[in-house]
């Protein structure tokens, strides 16, 4: 028997069960444990009811049930949200585990995607037609949460954020209505959903435009010893400022994980890495990346021609579910980290208290930056990079020490960083950080919230509170 802090009225629950074609789970039902579990083990929440829809009508029923019973409602897609917002305590969780279909129309180069699809589901079906759209770099991540916050990955410098490729969205709003949001219908809702997260409703269908990609790309990891980490980060900064859009190139400092693609001799050593994807002509790609192979000799060179889908899965074992996670993240200006910032970064990397933690500089720009900052709810178009401390550990007894180290390191970096943070990388932080994520678009987002969710039904997220 699971312990739930809140219960709901039995009659209301049986009405809901009668309406829903999919599954309705309470705390004593088989499957409840899996349904309430998310990627970040720091999240340990007990919903009163889980609805696993198989149709849009089930989502409408869940929304009406939550409204009538004055319960919070959370949406779980891939369950990767580091703040644990895929689940809630004592409320309703809409768990899209049974709605994961992806359908491609190769003639119009579009995909219709159900809200529970993961990056892997999406890539598998789209790449069968030689097509793709930008998504994330770990294939177990949900397309749902990733896209609604913006969504960047290896293809983003060529084709923009995931939201820049959206044609339309089907949404159940707080009043229980099913709406289509696009450039022609409910434009304000379409604008807000592209970067505003789950604040305005529950999306039941995503329509993406696709591009010809691969099926092979030049991609992989270059590993360098920790002793040259500063040199690697400085070179990465110079190299990426002039890189073509086809190349997306991250840098990181971390302990080499014990995964099959890292040679055993290097595993569990502190290393600097560059990991990259060149999604264009392979011969040209080899020429473009050559300087990364020669400025310092890598101790391991795993960059090779690979299937795009295989590369999209390469890091899945590096970021498995079930660890405790606390992230701090902020954007970096187009010029990159200063030499001083790099020295601070390397100093903290040398004292990292967990072998699972990674410090990552993600490469943005390209097509992401060519979209106006007010064109969608995602405002930080001019950032060159995202600086991230992805702190991860196993033992709950280490929570305080791990979080304290992360905060201290982040505070030392802040003077070197640009304003603003990616909403999808926010842990549970204050409203000032949520405002920093939406920045100049915040007031307009409040207006959209006021129009579509004035009672703040959808508040288990990085919340934009309505004025009332
Ligand atoms: C290992 C890992 C790798 C990542 N890599 C990337 C990356 O490469 N690029 C990137 O951009 N981000 C990346 N992220 C961040 C990721 O985008 C966010 O964690 C995102 O919230 C995950 O979405 P999800 O569907 O898996 O999460 P969930 O926890 O299931 O959902 C997150 C939130 O999204 C909202 N939501 C989800 N689906 C819907 C819906 N259908 N309707 C309304 N609201 C909805 C809800 O508010 C929900 O609380 C990564 C995260 C992890 C853990």
Image (cartoon, rainbow, N blue to C red):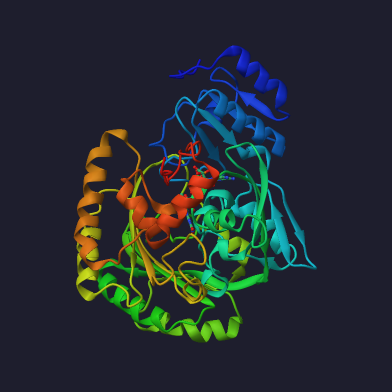
Out of 452 and 302, give the one closest to the viewer: 452
In the figure, 141 relative to 365: above or below?
Answer: above
Quarter of the image with the C terminus is top left
Q: Residue at x 23, y 68 (%)?
A: 416
For this view, does 133 lie left or right of residue 422? right
Direction from residue 114 to residue 390 in the image, left or right = left
Q: Quadrant of residue 396?
A: top left
Q: Which corner quadrant of the image does residue 56 belong to?
A: top right
Residue 290 in percent (x, y) is at 46, 84
Please tell me which residue lies in front, 379 or 308.
379
At 32% from the left and 52% from the top, the residue drawn is 433
- Residue located 47% across and 46% down the image: 320
Q: Is residue 339 above or below residue 153?
A: below
Q: Nearer the viewer, residue 4 or 272?
A: 4
Give left or right: position of 437 versus 176: left
Q: Residue at x 24, y 70 (%)?
A: 342
Q: In the orientation shown, which residue stands out farthest toward the right?
A: 107
The number of numbered discs placed on residues in the rendered structure image is 0
Tell me, yes or no, if residue 317 can be seen here: no
> Residue 423, position in %: x, y?
42, 54
- Is residue 25 visible from the viewing direction of this image? yes
Q: Is residue 404 above or below residue 176?
A: below
Q: How far across and down, in percent of the image, does residue 17 sit?
A: 67, 21
**Residue ranking furthest to the top:** 10
The spot of residue 38 in percent (x, y) is 48, 38
């Amino acid at each position: 028997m699971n312990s739930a802090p809140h219960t709901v009225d039995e009659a209301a629950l049986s009405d809901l069960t009668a309406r829903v074609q999919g599954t309705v789970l309470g705390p004593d039902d088989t499957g409840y444990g899996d349904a309430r579990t998310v990627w970040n083990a720091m999240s340990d929440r007990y919903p009163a009811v889980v609805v696993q829809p198989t149709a849009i009508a089930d989502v409408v029923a869940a929304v009406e049930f939550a409204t009538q019973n004055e319960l919070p409602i959370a949406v779980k897609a891939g369950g990767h949200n580091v703040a644990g917002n895929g689940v809630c305590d004592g409320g309703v969780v809409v768990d899209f585990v049974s709605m994961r279909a992806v359908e491609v129309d190769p003639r119009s180069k579009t995909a219709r995607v159900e809200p529970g699809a993961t990056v892997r589901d999406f890539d598998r079906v789209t790449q069968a037609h030689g097509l793709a759209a930008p998504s994330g770099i770990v294939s177990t991540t949900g397309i749902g949460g990733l896209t609604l916050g913006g969504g960047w990955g290896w293809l983003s410098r060529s084709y923009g954020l995931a939201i820049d490729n959206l044609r339309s969205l089907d949404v159940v709003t707080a009043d229980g209505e099913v709406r289509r949001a696009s450039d022609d219908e409910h434009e304000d809702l379409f604008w807000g959903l592209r970067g505003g997260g789950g604040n305005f409703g529950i999306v039941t269908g995503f329509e993406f435009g696709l591009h010809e990609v691969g099926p092979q790309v030049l991609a992989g990891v270059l590993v360098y010893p920790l002793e040259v980490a500063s040199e690697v980060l400085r070179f990465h900064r110079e190299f990426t400022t002039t890189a073509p859009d086809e190349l997306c190139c991250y840098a990181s400092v971390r302990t080499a994980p014990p995964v099959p693609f890292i040679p055993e001799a290097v595993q569990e050593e502190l290393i600097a890495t560059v990991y990259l994807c060149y999604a264009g002509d392979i011969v040209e790609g080899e020429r473009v990346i050559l300087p990364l192979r020669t400025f310092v000799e890598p101790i391991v060179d795993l960059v090779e021609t690979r299937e795009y889908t295989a590369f999209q899965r390469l890091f899945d074992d590096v970021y498995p579910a079930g660890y405790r996670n606390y992230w701090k993240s902020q954007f970096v200006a187009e010029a990159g980290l200063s030499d001083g910032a790099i020295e601070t970064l390397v100093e903290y990397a040398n004292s990292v208290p967990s072998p699972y933690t990674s410090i990552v500089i993600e490469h943005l720009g390209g097509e992401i930056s060519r979209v106006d900052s007010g064109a969608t709810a995602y405002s930080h178009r001019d950032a060159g990079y995202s600086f991230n401390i992805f702190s991860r550990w196993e033992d709950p007894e280490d929570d305080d020490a791990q979080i304290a180290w992360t905060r201290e390191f982040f505070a030392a970096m802040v003077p070197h960083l640009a304003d603003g943070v990616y909403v999808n990388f926010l842990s549970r932080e204050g409203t000032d950080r949520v405002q920093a994520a939406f920045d100049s678009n915040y007031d307009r987002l409040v207006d959209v919230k006021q129009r579509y969710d004035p009672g703040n039904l959808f508040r288990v997220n990085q919340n934009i509170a309505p004025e009332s």
